[in-house]
C-alpha cells in the first residue's frame, strides 16, 4: 500500500458504523463512507474521528442502549518536507536524526515516554536518569495537553528527540498560545508552599541540565546528559 501526502488511512471496528439512527435501525457502512468523503480536504483525520465518536454516543443515548466499544485509528502520512518543517519548529536541524511522535490524550503519554526511556536504557543511561526522565516527560506532556491545548483532543502535542551516548534532547510543542515562564510563581516561597499546583516546571528544571522555551512559550526543550554534567 503506497500513500501520498494528504492521503488518509482509516481503521475502524463495527462500533463506528453500527450506529442506531433513532428508529432502532443500524446505519450501515455507506454512512461512514459518505461522512469520510465529505470530510477529506475539509477536516483533519482527528476532527473526523471525534465527530463520528460524538455521533456514535448520541445515537446510542437516543435509544437507551449501552455504549458499544469504539476503536478507530487514523494514519496521516507526513511528507519529507513536512517532517523537516516539524524538525525546524521543534528547534532541531534538518539533518538531526529526530524521532517524531504525536500525542493528543493523556492515555498516550506512557507510550510516547516509553520510546524515549527505552532508547536511554539501550544506550546505558543510569537508572536514576531514566527514572527522572519519566517524571519530567509525564509533567511536560500533561502540561502541554491540559494547559497548552486546553484539553482539546483535536489539537496535537508534537515531540521529537535525539539521543546518543552523551546526551538526550527532547523538544515538546503544543498548539496553544503559550505562556511566560518567568511569570510562574516560585513554589519555594512561603506563600506558595501549601498550594497544590505550580511545582511541575520547578521539578523538571531540577532534574535536567538544560531547559529552554521558545519566544511564544508553547515549546520547551530539555537536555539531559549521561553523566549529569552540564556543558
Image (cartoon, helix red, strand yellow):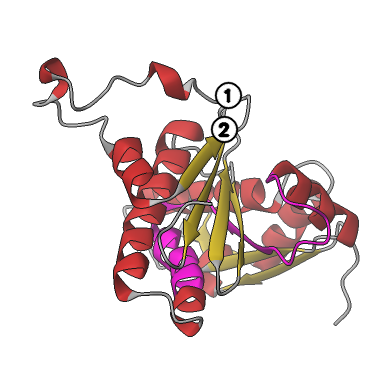
Name the residue beneath numbered marker 2. Answer: 218
Q: Is residue 132 magenta?
A: no
Label 2 packing within 10 angstroms: few (<14), some (14-19), many (20+): many
The picture places residue 121, in percent across and down from the top left corner, at 43, 80
Residue 165 as seen in the image, left or right of residue 48: left
Residue in the picture at 63% in, 45% down:
47
Q: Is residue 182 above or below residue 161?
A: above
- Nearest the viewer among 118 and 231 is 231
Q: Could you say whether the residue bearing mark 1 is in a helix, strand or loop?
A: loop
Which of the 4 image quadrants contains residue 187? Answer: top left
Q: Which sits earlier in the primary sequence, circle 2 or circle 1?
A: 1
Q: Which callout, 2 or 1, points to the residue nearer the camera? A: 2
Q: Is residue 105 above or below residue 184?
A: below
Label 1 packing within 10 angstroms: few (<14), some (14-19), many (20+): few
Residue in the picture at 54% in, 62% down:
168
Quadrant for the N terminus in the image: bottom right
The picture places residue 142, in percent across and down from the top left corner, at 39, 45
Q: Which residues are magenta?
A: 90-117
Q: Which mark is residue 177?
A: 1
Q: Are marks 2 and 1 in contact (CB under 8 Å)?
A: yes
The picture places residue 32, in percent across and down from the top left corner, at 68, 60
Count the numbered circles shown: 2
Residue in the picture at 46% in, 78% down:
118
- Nearest the viewer among 187 and 195 is 187
Rounded to the nearest whole Å, what is the CA distance between mark 2 and mark 1?
A: 6 Å
Amino acid at each position: 500500500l503506497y500513500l501520498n501526502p494528504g492521503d488518509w488511512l482509516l481503521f475502524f471496528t463495527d462500533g463506528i458504523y453500527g450506529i442506531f439512527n433513532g428508529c432502532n435501525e443500524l446505519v450501515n457502512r455507506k454512512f461512514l463512507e459518505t461522512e469520510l468523503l465529505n470530510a477529506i480536504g475539509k477536516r483533519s483525520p482527528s476532527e473526523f474521528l471525534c465527530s463520528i465518536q460524538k455521533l456514535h454516543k448520541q445515537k446510542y443515548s437516543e435509544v437507551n442502549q449501552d455504549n458499544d466499544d469504539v476503536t478507530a485509528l487514523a494514519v496521516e502520512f507526513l511528507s519529507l518536507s513536512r517532517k523537516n518543517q516539524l524538525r525546524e519548529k521543534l528547534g532541531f536541524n534538518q539533518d538531526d536524526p529526530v524521532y517524531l511522535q504525536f500525542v493528543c490524550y493523556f492515555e498516550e503519554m506512557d507510550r510516547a515516554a516509553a520510546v524515549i526511556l527505552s532508547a536511554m536504557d539501550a544506550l546505558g543511561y543510569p537508572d536514576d536518569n531514566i527514572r527522572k526522565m519519566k517524571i519530567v516527560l509525564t509533567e511536560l506532556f500533561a502540561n502541554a495537553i491540559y494547559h497548552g491545548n486546553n484539553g482539546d483532543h483535536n489539537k496535537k502535542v508534537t515531540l521529537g528527540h535525539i539521543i546518543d551516548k552523551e546526551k538526550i534532547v527532547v523538544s515538546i510543542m503544543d498548539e496553544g498560545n503559550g505562556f511566560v515562564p518567568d511569570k510562574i510563581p516560585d513554589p519555594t516561597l512561603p506563600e506558595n508552599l501549601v498550594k497544590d499546583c505550580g511545582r511541575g516546571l520547578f521539578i523538571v528544571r531540577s532534574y535536567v541540565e538544560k531547559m529552554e522555551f521558545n519566544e511564544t512559550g508553547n515549546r520547551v526543550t530539555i537536555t539531559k546528559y549521561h553523566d549529569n554534567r552540564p556543558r
